[in-house]
Image: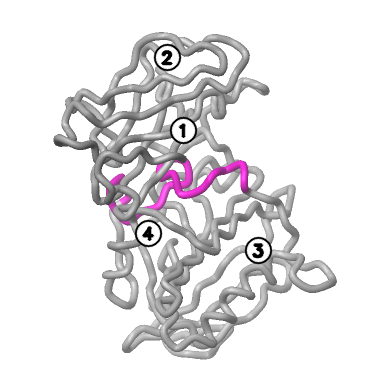
Amino acid sequence: MPLHQYGILKGRPIQKRLGMGQSPHYQIHIVDDETDYRIAINVKSKLSPSELLYVVDERFEHSLLAELETQPMGFTLLPSQPDSLALDFIRGNLFDRGDLIPLPHDVPGPDNDLNEKIDAHVTRALAEEDAVVYAFGERWGPEANSRDKYFGFRPGNGIHDIHMNQGNVGRFVKDDGVWQDGALMIHFPSEDRWVAIFLAFQSQSWHTDDQTGHTIPMEPGKDPQGQINIIAAQVNPEGGDVGRETVTLLNLTPTPIDISGWGILDKHKKREMLTGVIDPGEAVRVTLTGNGAQLSNKGGIITLVDQNGMKIDGVSYTKKDAERQGWTLVF
């Protein structure tokens, strides 16, 4: 069953605490205009290997940020669906999974463990009067008769599962779902900068069912991702968009690849069907018909999938990226 109360928590940070003990979580105390909350972030896996995978993007850009900034303070439930503020590490093109690095939660020395990677940005947010924290995950509470066990406020209240929430194994399969992944983002308005922290467990799969989020079994060495890359797109062509938008695909492999039956998806998951063969090292420029995928000038995502719906590559672009009419974006 997917997460029960998936959403986003927005507030000002006022305290923090490093993750320690048998099941360590990095803790952040945040407040909105009226309510106290705690953000509990896993920094160690209960399953082997124990080191979490992480990406910290110190200058995060994505089409969702414009709407994210307008969200009210406090917790907001989100529908687990595309073209919403809900996150999906596989389908949302938030980062390149090749950038994920495994890291222990507690290692002697400065700036070399996951606690410290998170703490550096939270500490900066505590020092900046206008910094705002956004946590994606599952809500718990309010617990009317309980104080928070870390920061002492009443009632106990907060958000957890600040990590990938699909492709799980063992007893955690019950939490699988699509468009319900967790993350921590921090906005520094005075710097016009967003920091995004994405976490995943090494035991999780990167190929999951589009409906359930359950793992799709994959033969070793048969991962289709990385065969063909989306290297460019014209999202705001001169003379109007319909029938003029293009996406350029590059075959990275040493063999021809038949893309017949493959598709290009937009942020609404509308599909442009593909045909033909891309030779080794060759690029093909696909013109979108306007009957399938359409590239919004307000920002969006572009995803390439094979005939089975398996993701091959994905990119994102912002409204600012699309401003110059007639120019081609390079990814």
Magenta stretch: includes residue 86: yes
Q: Is residue 6 left or right of residue 226?
A: left
Judging from the image, what secondary structure is the residue with disc 3 in?
loop
CA gap, disc 2 to disc 1?
16 Å
For marks 3 and 4, give the CA distance: 20 Å
Tell me which amino acid carries mark 3: Val
**Cβ–Cβ under 8 Å for marks 2 and 1:** no
Q: Which residue is mark 3?
A: 43
Q: Residues within 10 Å of mark 2 (few under 14, many from 20)?
A: some
Q: How many angstroms separate mark 4 from mark 2 (CA)?
A: 36 Å
Q: Element type at marker 1? A: strand
State which mark lies toward you, 3 or 4: 3
Q: State whether the magenta stretch is mostly helix, strand or loop.
A: loop
Q: Residue furthest right?
A: 108
Foreground disc of the pair 3, 2: 2
Dot in front, 4 or 1: 1
Q: Which residue is mark 1?
A: 231
- Give the camera-side residue of 203 and 287: 287
| Label located before the other in sequence (3 or 4) | 4
Choose mark 2 or mark 1, whichever is in front.
Answer: 1
Q: Which mark is residue 6?
A: 4
Q: Earlier in the sequence, mark 3 or mark 2?
A: 3
Which residue is at a point 37% across and 47% down the rendered structure image?
A: 317
Crowd band around label 4 with a 10 angstrom C-alpha radius: few (<14), some (14–19), many (20+):
many
Mark nearer the N terminus (2 vs 1): 1
How far is the residue under mark 3 from the one under mark 2? 40 Å
Highlighted range, magenta = 80-99
Identified at 33% across, 76% down, the residue is 74
Q: Label 2: state its secondary structure.
A: loop
Q: Amino acid at mark 2?
A: Ile
Label placed on residue 259: 2
